[in-house]
Structures are given as C-alpha cells and as structure tokens.
Amino acid sequence: PWAARMHAPVLAAGPHTSLAGVWARRPEAAAGLGAPVFTRLEDLFEVCEAVAFAVPPAVQAELAVRAARAGKALLLEKPLAADLDGAERVAAAVAEAGVLSQMVFSWRYAKGVREFLAEARACEPFGAQARYVSGSLRPESPFATPWRLARGAVLDIGPHMIDLVDAALGRVVDVRARGSVLGWAGLLLEHEGGALSEVSLCMSAPGERDAAVTVYGERGRAHVDHTALGDDVVFPAMAAEFATTVRSGVPHPLDAARGLHVQRLIAAAEAQFTS
C-alpha cells in the first residue's frame, strides 16, 4: 500500500525529487502511479539517479543488490530484507559499489521524534518502555499482506521501535523475546552501558493504533507518541533528506549498515519465538 499512498506521490511532488519512472511486479499497479512504467529494471536504472523501494522485504533484498551494482543510490524500506542473509547481501552490495543509501525508519524524520531523542539522551537514561499496537493484521486492514501475515509484528514494526530505543538508550547488545510474532510479542533489550528497554509489539488488536516510547533516566524522562509523526510531514522531510544525501555525497546515519544492525537484532528475536 505504501507505494501508492506515500512513496510515489511524495517523490513526484518534489520540490527536491521527481519521479523518473516506476517498475512493479504487476504492471497494472505501476500504471496508476502517474509516471513512465518500465518492464525491465535495467531500463529504469538508465533514467534515474536513485531508486526508492516499496516492495516486500524478500523482493527488496534481490532488487537492491541489482540497483547498487548499477551505481544507484537507494532509499530502502524497513526491514532491509526478509532475513539476515538477505540484509547482509544488500549491505555488502552497497559497500562494494560505494553507493549512498538511506532507510525508511519513518519515525526518525519527525521533528518531534528528534526532540524526544535529544531529551532522552540528556536525561541519562537507564530504561525505556516502547509499544506499538495496531490492527494491521486483521482482515479489514490494507496492510494485511502475505509477508506481514506470515512474519508478523517483529519483522514489520519491530525495526521502527528497535531503531528508536537503540538511538535513545545506546546500541543494543542483547535481545530476549517471548510471546508470539502473530499475537503479542515482548522484547527485552540490553543496551551498551547497562540500560534496559521493554518493547511490546502487536498487529492483531482491534481499535485505534497505540504507539509510544517513554525513556526514564537519572535526570528525568522523555516521551514521544506516534501522533508526533504526521506522515504528511515526515515523508516529504525524508525525501528532502534523501535528495540531500544523494547530491552532497555525504552518507546518512540511517543507511544500509544501520538497517543491517537492526536486522541482526530482529533475527535474534525471531529465533526465540515458536510462532
């Protein structure tokens, strides 16, 4: 759903980017995005500076390697791949080709989230609680897509929350996981320096989405709610930063290497679930 909802319209709207063309596994899906449709990826690569992905994780892992080898900068969805092997291949291809990359960790482009992270780090944090509860896997949801229904909350929304607590409390060095990836998943993360964070993930709950992070520290606390994002503001900000990354040649901190770090934590968590 994200290609039609956000990626295509935001990149086409500019002013920092334009949509040179679209490739999709289903040509009819690409035809509705208001840009030239390509049936061969290599033809698309010839007319663009960069490639933005809005495909399932397993598909991204395959296509991103091809795009990197073609010398294209990459705007990569989370997770980086469907599994750790795929993520390692993407990160290696990016490094070997020397191309620029940037992850769609959408929370991180919001002004309110950046203010939260500054406050969290200043409060000398020792712990955090994070939650992301939604009904995205329920039958009526447009996000109940095959890969999400198969892999659940940890692979889909886990990257957002793990990246955020990692940024707030320090690099995650250990993961313990309990529950169910298709039901309620609970993660206990240990950070460098000894701080701990608890992350609760669920995509099968009815009702409104509830997503927030609270950090506790020696000098107070910091809190951010999903309502601080505003996708209509966050995605254009992300597109503008990506354009700056590509044109300046300066690597972005949320690059493929960052995506690989998060994927390693996701893989460690998933290995502890039985369903």
Image (cartoon, rainbow, N blue to C red):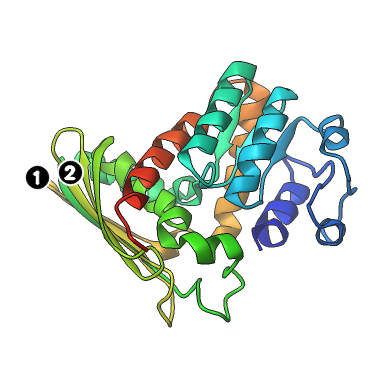
Q: Amino acid at mark 2?
A: Cys
Query: Which residue carries the number 2 mark?
Result: 123
Residue at the image position 37 percent from the left and 71 percent from the top: 183
Query: How many numbered marks, from 0 up?
Result: 2
Residue at the image position 88 percent from the left and 45 percent from the top: 38
* Mark 2 neighbour density, 10 Å: few (under 14) some (14–19) many (20 or more): some
Q: Residue furthest left?
A: 218
Q: Which mark is residue 218?
A: 1
Q: Is residue 78 above or below residue 62?
A: below
**Mark positioned earlier in the residue sequence (1 or 2):** 2
Is residue 240 visible in the rendered image? The answer is: no
Query: Element type at marker 2?
Result: loop
Quote the CA–CA distance across marks 1 and 2: 6 Å
The image quadrant that residue 238 belongs to is top right
Residue at the image position 65 percent from the left and 59 percent from the top: 2
CB contact under 8 Å: marks 1 and 2: yes
Q: Position of residue 8 (x, y in %)?
A: 74, 53
Viewer-side residue, 48 vs 15: 48
Query: Element type at marker 1?
Result: loop
From the viewer's perspective, tell me whether residue 196 is left or right of residue 74.
left
Viewer-side residue, 73 vs 24: 24
Q: Position of residue 6 (x, y in %)?
A: 66, 57
From the viewer's perspective, tell me whether residue 220 is left or right of residue 256.
left
